[in-house]
Amino acid sequence: MAVDLDDIDWAIIEQLQQEARISLSELGRRVRLSASATTERVRNLESLGVITGYHAVVDLTRVGYPVLAVVRLKYPGNRHQPLHRLLAERREILECLRTTGDDCYTLKVAATSMAHLEVLMGELADFGSTTTSVVYSQTLPARGPARP
Amino acid sequence: MAVDLDDIDWAIIEQLQQEARISLSELGRRVRLSASATTERVRNLESLGVITGYHAVVDLTRVGYPVLAVVRLKYPGNRHQPLHRLLAERREILECLRTTGDDCYTLKVAATSMAHLEVLMGELADFGSTTTSVVYSQTLPARGPARP
DNA sequence: CCTGAAATTGCTCAGCC
DNA sequence: GGCTGAGCAATTTCAGG
């Protein structure tokens, strides 16, 4: 499942993780490769599924979601379908990880207010018992993995 | 702290959240705006801090991190400095949220193997008691908030 | 993987609505 | 605020080596 990546591949990945909107020629300059070779490398990383996408990140507070919460969901039984439907509908749920342990799911939820969070928690409570922690601050900037 | 955003701003944000590498003219076409107007809008969203960056997302398994874990850290006392140092050094820690509740921090950690995860947990254990859940699957694609 | 040239495309900035 | 159009710069692409 893992792909063999050399130094240049990793240099490309590092650059695009930091600044995804640079041109391929600028990227080539930074990793010391010609534009054509850079283009081919990037296309390859994309088609191998190493790079899965390029996304703008927004400041949640500034776009109107000042409340962020981590929710753990204890989900008895196996009927995951209804939860998946909720995930599809509710864009306030930004992330959903299925995990080992007592709490089957860990979610990241954005809300416009505590009242809004309460509504969302009500919907999640239909699925099982929840544990909610409100986020004070995001201690890290967005980043991805480095070369192992 | 919040910024007033109209429909076009949101259309721009939606597009860039999905596909951050499109050109400004292509973006303009999609949101039905001229290239110059689009450019000005995007620059504005950036300088207001609404858009904080553009980042490539990689498949953790394919780049050599097949193990992902959610770690909750119960952190007694107020000396956060040492933890911040660890965060800076250890790129395996992808995210760190400071939260309300018994567990002061929730972290997302990528590891090359369970043995590697064990090493990382050892380092985190220096700071307080930890609860670790290994992630089976990421149930959602990367996505951001929608218009409230 | 590189170079070099051609073609396309995108970007910027007036002037104007 | 936004549009158009021109001029300019840049990137992308594709041979051939």
Image: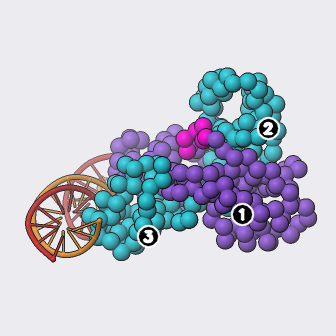
Chain colours: A purple, B cyan, C red, D orange
Mark 2 and mark 3: span between their CA atoms? 40 Å
Q: Are marks 1 and 3 in contact (CB under 8 Å)?
A: no
Magenta part, dominant SS: loop
Are the residues under marks 1 and 3 on the same chain? no
Note whether residue A49 is visible: no
- Tell me the quadrant of the picture where the N terminus of chain A can be found: bottom right
Q: Residue at x 34, y 60 (%)?
A: B41
- Name which residue type carries label 1: Val
Say few, some or many: other residues with alpha carbon within 10 Å of mark 2 (under 14 / 14 to 19 / 20 or more). Answer: few
Q: Residue at x 56, y 65 (%)?
A: B148
Note whether residue B40 is visible: yes
The tag on residue A119 is: 1
SS type, badge 2? loop
The tag on residue B102 is: 2
Mark 1 and mark 2: span between their CA atoms? 23 Å
Decide: is B87 above or below A54: above
SS type, badge 3? helix
Instruction: Tell me the subunit letter for badge 1.
Output: A
Q: Residue at x 91, y 64 (%)?
A: A77
Q: Is residue B131 magenta?
A: no
Q: Position of residue A55 (x, y in %)?
A: 51, 57
Q: Position of residue B138 (x, y in %)?
A: 71, 57
Is C1 or A118 nearer to us in this picture?
Answer: A118
Is A123 or A96 nearer to us in this picture?
Answer: A123
* Most distant residue in the right direction: A77
Residues rendered magenta in the picture: A137-142
